[in-house]
Image (cartoon, rainbow, N blue to C red):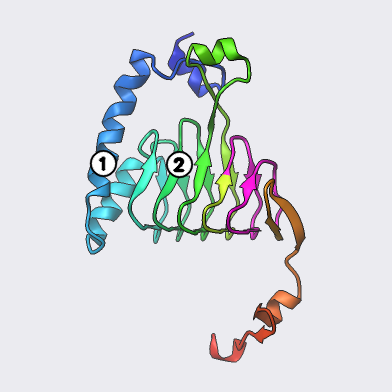
Amino acid sequence: MTQYERMIQGLVYDPGDPEIMKEQVPLQDRLWEFNQLKPSDYKKKEQFMKELFAECGEGTYIELPFHANWGGHHVHLGEYVYINSNMTMVDDGNIFIGSRVMFGPNVMIATANHPVNPELRRKGLQYNKDVCIGENAWIGGSVVIVPGVHIGANAVIGAGSVVTKDIPDNVVAAGNPCRVLREVGERDRQFFYKEERIDWENLQ
């Protein structure tokens, strides 16, 4: 079994293997080109995203700069995803993001991890575990999401959280480590901030 095959299967492998580097480095070069685009280069940005990412739905938008180990090659984006600036996706494994997910600035999603065993780390080995984020989730600024985590649909992750375990659908969660604080409920249909009411009649 090659090191690339081991990588794809989520086994411990050597990320510096020549076969892997031969495929990875050109993708990083393409990502560098993507990050040189101006904010007004809408069409070029859209074209780059279609070419760079494993999947990229309509209406998805990224505020540059954007960082990714594999240039976004293992990133699957739904429709109308919004990614604020300085997103880092350690996409050695797959990252699946549902439609209408929003990210604050300085978020980091990691799929790559290193063994606790010091002998394996000394050899520079790692393994990857996929990350999944359900549709319509909101990920606050400076959130860290570690390998293997699943975040449910409509979930809200508070700014600065470190998500180390799965988060279910329809909850507000925050902290380090991130934990569920409450469910999204009827009060959230009435108030958008503290005691300030949502004026639904003007939002049609």
**Label 2 environment density (alpha carbons within 10 Å; few <14, some 14–19, many ≥20):** many
Residue 155 belongs to the span the image colors magenta: yes
Secondary structure beneath label 1: helix
Residue 47 drawn at (x, y percent) = 27, 51
Q: Earlier in the sequence, mark 1 or mark 2?
A: 1
Task: Name above or below for residue 180 compared with residue 6.
Answer: below
Circle 1 residue: 32
- Most foreground residue, 186 or 55: 186
Secondary structure beneath label 2: strand
The answer to which quarter of the image holds residue 197 is bottom right
Dot 2 amino acid type: Met
Residue 200 drawn at (x, y percent) = 61, 86
What segment carries the magenta color?
A: 145-169
**Label 1 environment density (alpha carbons within 10 Å; few <14, some 14–19, many ≥20):** some
Q: Looking at the figure, which quarter contains the C terminus?
A: bottom right
Q: What residue is drawn where x is 64% and y is 60%?
A: 154
Residue 186 drawn at (x, y percent) = 76, 75
**Label 1 to label 2, Cα distance in Å?**
14 Å
Q: Is residue 9 left or right of residue 188?
A: left
Q: What residue is drawn where x is 30% and y is 20%?
A: 22
- Most foreground residue, 125 or 45: 125
Q: Is residue 152 left or right of residue 39?
A: right
Residue 107 belongs to the span the image colors magenta: no
Numbered label attached to residue 140:
none
Q: What residue is drawn where x is 76% and y is 59%?
A: 181
Circle 2 residue: 89
Q: Are marks 1 and 2 in contact (CB under 8 Å)?
A: no
The answer to which quarter of the image holds residue 169 is bottom right
Task: Name above or below for residue 17 compared with residue 182.
Answer: above
Residue 156 drawn at (x, y percent) = 64, 60
Q: Main secondary structure of the magenta part?
A: loop
Task: Name above or below for residue 110 compared with residue 36.
Answer: above
